[in-house]
Image (spheres, rainbow, N blue to C red):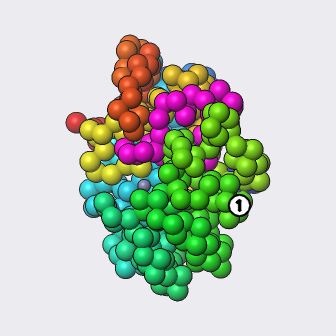
């Protein structure tokens, strides 16, 4: 990743530095984000800094940057992070979705299987017209997500040739294949559906994201079908067939899967995807998320998902350090899909996608998927988003 980053153009930064008359070294920027606590896990940076932006790219990150700017954001007392990346959303279901999550600081998203071969073209069209970078996973079931009936009850819906056709005609935005494996979705077809998802994805060199929890088959059998770079979402789904055994211990197969490069994603969602007890037992054994995601859709504001910063805040209660918390929503997420290679970072030359967050102290109620409430002392709120160097409207 860093190797690829090294080749990023620095022409924007160079142009900014020589923008004035020869001999005058004062720089001129398009936007200056002043005095925030810059947390950029891609650089291991946590310090008060200014961030200067020119021509849509990060031009400088330094203390007290001299020079003028067309626009300024006063970020004193706020956290300045790389734009957030949410790898499990359903933002592609509606034209309005992407603009809504942009207000949450989300400057990159993946729609995880809303559409299958029959209807993913509409999701791909939403991704192409989104203000920020949006990418798509093709559901291995040709219908995409069907609610409340599961899309894999009829195994005939998992048609490899049709899925491959959908990938081929949307190759510009499709970054993988999705399979939902809960018994309510897939009945007893979980393993065969996953085999077909791999068969569709592998010729294109793409990962598969699976949704686990309450599956017919034990997780051990499911994990055995995953390759390096594949993603397990809803990682803290409670029993049966979650990541913990009857005694609450992590299955060795789970840690083994992580060691061989399988990514474990939080996937908040609303129903049966996590409970506090599973998060607590797993994190006590050192099993933290690689990435956060919301499983967001346009109705999520009122369901306990709210927004990605809210989902991230849940892990502050369990003692996750801020640097790691922000890494999960930025650089770690960017590493999952090559489409996000130059994102999730404030490196000079990178696209100027920035999330300004407010870490507020108080008493905040957070909910799991079983109406369990826990009170935390801190919560992150999105206060401003910069996309491609431009300030975007704040959430009402
Ligand atoms: Zn989902």
Q: Is residue 224 visible?
A: yes
User: Is 145 rendered above or below residue 3?
Assistant: below
Which is more toward the observer, 116 or 55?
Answer: 116
Residue furthest to the top = 362
Q: Please report the bounds of the magenta region as a residue range.
A: 264-291
Which is more toward the observer, 17 or 218?
Answer: 218
Which is more toward the observer, 67 or 333?
Answer: 333
What residue is disc 1 on? 224
Location of residue 49 in the rendering, given as x and y in whole percent from the top left corner:
56, 26
Q: Quadrant of residue 380?
A: top left
Location of residue 62 in the rendering, given as x and y in whole percent from the top left corner:
61, 29
Location of residue 139 in the rendering, given as x and y in whole percent from the top left corner:
46, 69
- Say which residue appears at 65% left-offset and 79% top-offset: 203
User: Is 350 rendered above or below residue 37?
Assistant: below
Location of residue 337 in the rendering, given as x and y in whole percent from the top left corner:
60, 59
Q: Is residue 4 left or right of residue 322?
A: right
């Amino acid at each position: 990743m860093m190797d690829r980053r090294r080749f990023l153009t620095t022409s924007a930064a160079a142009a900014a530095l020589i923008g004035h008359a020869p001999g005058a070294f004062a720089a001129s920027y398009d936007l200056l984000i002043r005095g925030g606590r810059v947390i950029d896990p891609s650089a291991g940076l946590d310090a008060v800094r200014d961030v200067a932006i020119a021509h849509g790219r990060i031009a400088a990150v330094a203390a007290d940057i001299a020079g003028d700017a067309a626009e300024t954001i006063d970020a004193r007392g706020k956290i300045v992070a790389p734009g957030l990346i949410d790898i499990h959303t359903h933002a592609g279901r509606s034209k309005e979705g992407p603009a809504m999550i942009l207000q949450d600081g989300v400057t990159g998203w993946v729609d995880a299987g809303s559409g299958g071969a029959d209807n993913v073209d509409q999701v791909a069209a939403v991704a192409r017209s989104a203000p920020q970078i949006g990418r798509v996973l093709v559901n291995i079931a040709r219908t995409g997500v069907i609610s409340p009936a599961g899309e894999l009850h009829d195994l005939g819906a998992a048609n490899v040739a049709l899925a491959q056709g959908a990938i081929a005609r949307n190759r510009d935005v499709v970054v993988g294949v999705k399979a939902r494996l809960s018994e309510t979705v897939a009945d007893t077809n979980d393993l065969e559906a996953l085999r077909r998802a791999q068969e569709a994805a592998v010729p294109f060199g793409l990962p598969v994201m699976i949704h686990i929890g309450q599956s017919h088959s034990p997780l051990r059998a499911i994990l055995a079908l995953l390759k390096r770079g594949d993603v397990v979402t809803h990682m803290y789904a409670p029993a049966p067939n979650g990541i913990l055994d009857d005694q609450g211990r992590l299955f060795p197969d789970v840690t083994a899967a992580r060691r061989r490069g399988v990514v474990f994603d939080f996937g908040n969602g609303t129903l049966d995807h996590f409970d506090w007890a599973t998060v607590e037992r797993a994190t006590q054994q050192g099993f933290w998320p690689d990435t956060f995601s919301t499983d967001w859709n346009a109705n999520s504001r009122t369901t306990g998902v709210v927004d990605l910063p809210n989902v991230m805040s849940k892990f502050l209660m369990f003692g996750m350090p801020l640097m790691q918390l922000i890494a999960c929503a930025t650089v770690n997420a960017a590493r999952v899909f090559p489409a996000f290679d130059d994102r999730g970072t404030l490196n000079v030359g990178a696209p100027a996608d920035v999330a300004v967050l407010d870490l507020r102290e108080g008493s905040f109620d957070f909910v799991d998927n079983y109406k369990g409430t826990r009170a935390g002392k801190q919560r992150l709120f999105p206060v401003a988003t910069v996309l491609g160097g431009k300030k975007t409207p704040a959430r009402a």
